[in-house]
Image (spheres, rainbow, N blue to C red):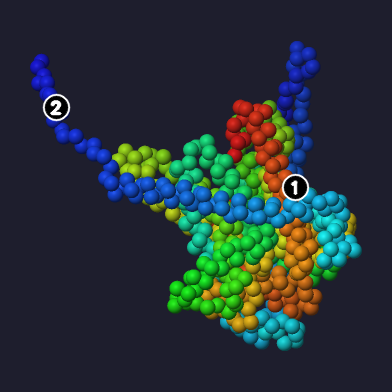
Amino acid sequence: MPRGLTAVRLNRAGASAELKRTDSRAAWRGDRLFKSAAAAAGSSIVVGVLLIALFLVIRAVPSLRANHENFFTSAKFDTADGKDLAFGIRDLFMVTVLSSMSALALAVPVAVGIAMFLTQYAPARLSRPFGAIVDLLAAVPSIIFGLWGIFVVAPTLEPFAAFLNRNLGWLFLFKQGNVSLAGGGTIFTAGVVLSAMILPIITSVSREVFRQTPRIQIEAALALGATKWEVVRMTVLPFGRSGVIAASMLGLGRALGETVAVLIILRSAAHPGNWSVFDGGYTFASKIASAASEFSDPLPTGAYISAGLALFVLTFIVNAAARLIAGGKVNG
Amino acid sequence: MNFDVLEKPVKAEVIRPVAMRRRIKNHIATTLFLASFLIALVPLGWVLSVVVARGWCAVSRSGWWTHSLRGVLPEEFTGGVYHAVYGTLAQAGVAAIIAVPLGLMIAVFLAEYGSSLLARVTTFMVDVLAGVPSIVAALFIFSLWIATLGFQQCGFAVSLALVVLMVPLVVRSAEEMLRLVPDELREASYALGVPKWKTIVRIVFPIAAPGMVSGVLLSIARIIGETAPVLVLVGYSRSINFDIFDGNMASLPLLIYTELTNPEHAGFLRVWGAALTLIIIVAVINLAAWAIRFLATRQRGTRSYLRA
């Protein structure tokens, strides 16, 4: 701001305008202070994320050194004796990926359908209120989804799970798992509940992308005599494809890190699982949460922190991939 | 000049009705899209109805909101969850006190000063933080606050973990609201010789305020039911603890998780009662957020750009 700039201030009567000299140096100082405060806040978040990675690594490394098993290929998780650590994430990885993937397989088609309904079919006035109703699903705390899952959904799904197991048991996904079907504490139930939990984020991101479909393309398709479905197939879906993939990745990120709902639903198993949706066991997050009350000795705790580090890296990769695919047009 | 007047157009009629196959496909697609929306309503209605039906009996009892579980045996159904409601609100409140100013400043940095390399890195880091699972945030605070700095488990540690989860939510919503403020207002302010920081504080903030407040309330509603941080960072207590910096402290998710292991019928009632209490708290915060946004857009009908 040039020096000597003046600000006009009308006095009470409004009759005569009085010119008041402003101290431009003071204003400039205030500006600098405010800008540095904003920049400091911005950098604090950068430092924060780096600290998360740093502290997880610092706490995980001693335990990884003391580990007798291969961290990536062992299915054991034995931390009872601090001097004889034997842990690996193979089983955790399997349960995490399988439950998240089955959630994704159920949620993505429905979410894309909802997004299409809200943007292309529903009346414009109702589109927003309907969208808000779907978003309400995200407001329900995850522990309540867990309660609902194990006490209400699991018994309801049990006959269906038994049917799948009987008729499609030849496929490795549906073969007999390492926990009993009765009670429903399986990856199958967890996947169904997780799909309800990640539905809102996939829907809202796809909705935003579908809404950006160029009007001209839609009108061109209509002018060629396309039916509504053909318009959707020829313009909206191709335009929104990358957005839907990004939305699914964001949903996957949520499902991978979901803790309490999975912890309540999944039953622990005596044997490691074998890629069946009727297995039980622990995901990364639920394993850590289940042992949380025993965190005291640094070495066993470090074993769980290294599992948390693996989860952090996994979600980071998935989320970064989502942003890359979407090219910045996604805000989830 | 002479024109030959034809009885019929030269061209044959080309507009034919849409073929049956295409029509059927179109109808099937419409039905599927509508059905998928209805499917989404199933879990929402189901969860809410189950929680209300099973929790109503506990929540409507006298003493539920005014007593703690101090001295209550597992099998007797008396006492209430006042200690857990206090813990939940206190932990979320302290988290909000830290996260809201920080988040707003970051949003100002991104929306008003956001062209530097630092701003781009910050946007990326906000995205990363938004994707961090709650259990990882809890482990981070555990390794920093408890394992490295040597503090005891307490409610404040939970608040710190909630800050990590809340900041990206606040930044996202506030940044969006700041960007909705038209540049003409900023330029008018600069033209009157008002410094930039004063323009932001006095012109931009008041206009964006209703949207920012409702965004903050929604982010509080999102983190208030987080269970992973309380499992890792604080112990359960059956009686009230007002001190957030010391000792065990109950909260609604922790109470639900603890009572799950109670095989008695009273445990069942308490679990669903606490679940309904949590839903009521979340619903009240959500309603407040909606009311603020609704009133703000109603009063100033012309400012339609604030409607998001």
Q: Secondary structure at mark 2?
A: loop
Spatial separation of the CA atoms under disc 1 and disc 2: 76 Å
Q: Is residue B117 visible?
A: no
Q: Secondary structure at mark 1?
A: helix
Residue corresponding to mark 2: B8
Percent of width and height locating residue A282: 63, 73
Relative placement, left or right, of B162 versus A238 is right
Percent of width and height locating residue B251: 79, 58
Q: Which mark is residue B101?
A: 1
Q: Amino acid at mark 1?
A: Pro
The quadrant the N terminus of chain A occupies is top right
Tally of numbered discs: 2
**Residue at the location (45% across, 43% down)?**
A120
Q: Is residue A293 visible?
A: yes
Percent of width and height locating residue A56: 70, 70
Q: Amino acid at mark 2?
A: Lys
Q: Quadrant of residue A304?
A: bottom right
Q: Which of the two discs, 1 and 2, labels the residue nearer the N terminus?
A: 2
**Residue at the location (72% across, 67% down)?**
B139
Relative placement, left or right, of A126 versus A260 is left
**Residue at the location (64% across, 65% down)?**
A150
**Residue at the location (64% across, 82% down)?**
A270
